[in-house]
Image (cartoon, grey):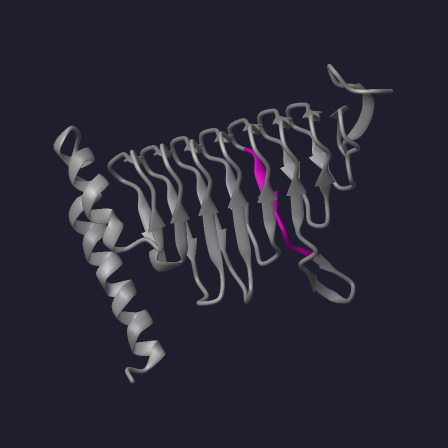
Amino acid sequence: MENTNHVIQRQKITAHIVTSLLGGIPRPLGTIMRQFLYKIIFARMGRNVYIQAGSEFLGANAIEIGNDVKIMRDVRLNVKTTNSFIRLGNRVCLDRGVDINVAGEDCSIEIGDSSYLGPYVCMSGPGHIKIGQQCLIASQTGIYANNHREYGLSREGITIEDNCWLGTGVRILDGVTIGRGSVVGAGAVVTKDIPPYSVAVGVPAKRIKASKGGCV
């Protein structure tokens, strides 16, 4: 039986060749070619996936992409370890310059159906990150599932539940859960859990009222 490391290395080389050859081809030809040929490098690629030129995929054999996904120019998805993965649900949109980096053992980053990540959003493990369905995350937001503490590096993970809105430049730190239907104001730094259906602002972020449809 072929050595597992050799298989993984061959997959990485294949992914690099494919993305190097196709990544810079402009539309409409490039769009059509990427839609068909990227299927050979991803762990899963659904129907009607649109990938613009200039995107980069490292560890593509651990990346799963749902149906009707849009990946815009200069997006970077990087899975560094063999037992980790990135999973994009159906109708997810990653806008220009989104950077998702899976680092560390047994790390996963999942983005639920119909969620949108704005330009230059950055997400990084090694803790798990789970974003629910129909979330809107504005540009320049940072979601970091790790933190340096007195006892070393933590990786408690981050959960953003369904129907959350995050404003421009929000920072989400390790160990946080943002409850369903919540709104986080621009520039806020979230260091503690936000209850469902809340509006939170500030540094550190604090709940100031219920969001529309929520309870006080």
Say which residue appears at 69% left-offset and 24% top-offset: 183
* Magenta stretch: includes residue 64: no
Say which residue appears at 59% left-offset and 45% top-offset: 130
Outermost residue, bottom direction? Answer: 1
**Residue 170 horizontal side relative to residue 101, left or right:** right
Q: Is residue 89 above or below residue 129?
A: above
**Residue 33 horizontal side relative to residue 196, left or right:** left
Say which residue appears at 75% left-offset and 32% top-offset: 203
Say which residue appears at 49% left-offset and 61% top-offset: 84
* Magenta stretch: includes residue 143: yes
Name the foreground residue: 136 vs 96: 136
Q: In which quarter of the image is the N terminus?
A: bottom left
Name the foreground residue: 86 vs 26: 86
The magenta region covers: 141-147
Q: Is residue 202 above or below residue 89?
A: above
Residue 112 percent across, percent down from the top left:
53, 38
Residue 96 percent across, percent down from the top left:
38, 32
Image quarter of residue 33: top left
Q: Quadrant of the C terminus?
A: top right
Residue 10 percent across, percent down from the top left:
25, 69
